[in-house]
Amino acid sequence: MSNGRRPRRPGIGGARIEEWLGESTVRMLDDAGVTAGSHVIDIAAGAGGQTVAAARRAGSSGWVLATDISPAILDFATRSAAAAGLTNVETLEADGEDLRAIPDATYDAAISRVGLIYFPDRGQALAEMHRVLRPGGRASAVVYAAAERNGFFAVPVGIIGAAAGLPAPAPGLPGPFSLAGDGVATAAFTAAGFVDVTATAVPSPVRFSSSAECTRFERESFGALHQMLAGVDESTRTQTWERIEHALGEYDGPTGFVGPCEMLVVSGIRP
């Protein structure tokens, strides 16, 4: 999970992330038409879990280019691909809003997992995805559904926002739920020139042994939360994470922690 605009460090939860986002990732790759021989670009690839999944599908006759603004996170993605025995993955340090190094109509598929929501100019990022696709190429992105369907993340966002004195993001500004409004995601794809645009809700509950484990996961893996806390002192930061763990306790149960989450897979075709 990355945003293409700022570095994000891989946390301890790589396997957890793939478990949590596994179903939406499969849907994204299906909608993008990734199959043997596909040439795929992954925008805001982050640590590259979905890059690896796409590369496995593309096989030795296809290849995947993972792009991100952070060279450190791309190094991690490269190591992940190598550890998986894949030789069909390349990386490029690039802002997803400016892919000038990539010629027009180069790729069969463009994907982005939990990255598009954080671009300051989402329309430009989508325009670049559209430009680098061949006619008939498919784009697909995983984003969060509405905040009320994502308690595991909306709760920390609300607590941190209050602690840091941050206003709620205005409509159109980047943020976790910036594509969650009714029809917002499909409208953004349509405005970028995509056709046959769809948005599919994918239930994606987050499962841990306890709320404490979920808090640790979010603290170590969610760069957006750390950015929100950047302006507060260490004592306030510590107290805020304690409040988050307490609040997330609402989702503890006899079988462990089950945090509400729903993702949207938004997809379209370049005519």
Image (cartoon, rainbow, N blue to C red):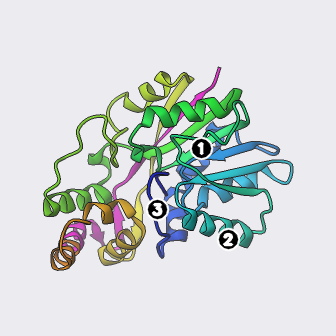
Residue highlighted by disc 3: 7
Q: Residue at x 44, y 28 (%)?
A: 188
Q: Quadrant of residue 258?
A: bottom left
In the image, the segment drawn in magenta is: 243-271
| Circle 3 SS class | loop
Q: Residues within 10 Å of mark 1 (few under 14, many from 20)?
A: many
First along the sequence among labels 1 and 2? 2
Work out whether 147 lies above or below 33: below
Which amino acid, by three-letter code, is at mark 2?
Arg
Q: Residues within 10 Å of mark 2 (few under 14, many from 20)?
A: some
Residue highlighted by disc 2: 79
Which amino acid, by three-letter code, is at mark 3?
Pro
Which amino acid, by three-letter code, is at mark 1?
Ile
| Circle 2 SS class | helix
Work out whether 204 lies above or below 269: below
| Circle 1 SS class | strand
How far apart are labels 1 and 2 at the CA level?
Answer: 20 Å
Q: Position of residue 217 (x, y in %)?
A: 39, 72
Q: Position of residue 56 (x, y in %)?
A: 74, 56
Q: Is residue 107 magenta?
A: no
Which residue reaches farthest front?
Answer: 100
First along the sequence among labels 3 and 1? 3
Q: Position of residue 55 (x, y in %)?
A: 73, 54
Residue highlighted by disc 1: 111
Q: Nearer the viewer, residue 196 or 60?
A: 60
| Left-right relation of 80 to 195 | right
Callout in the foreground (3, 2): 3
Q: Nearer the viewer, residue 264 or 130?
A: 130
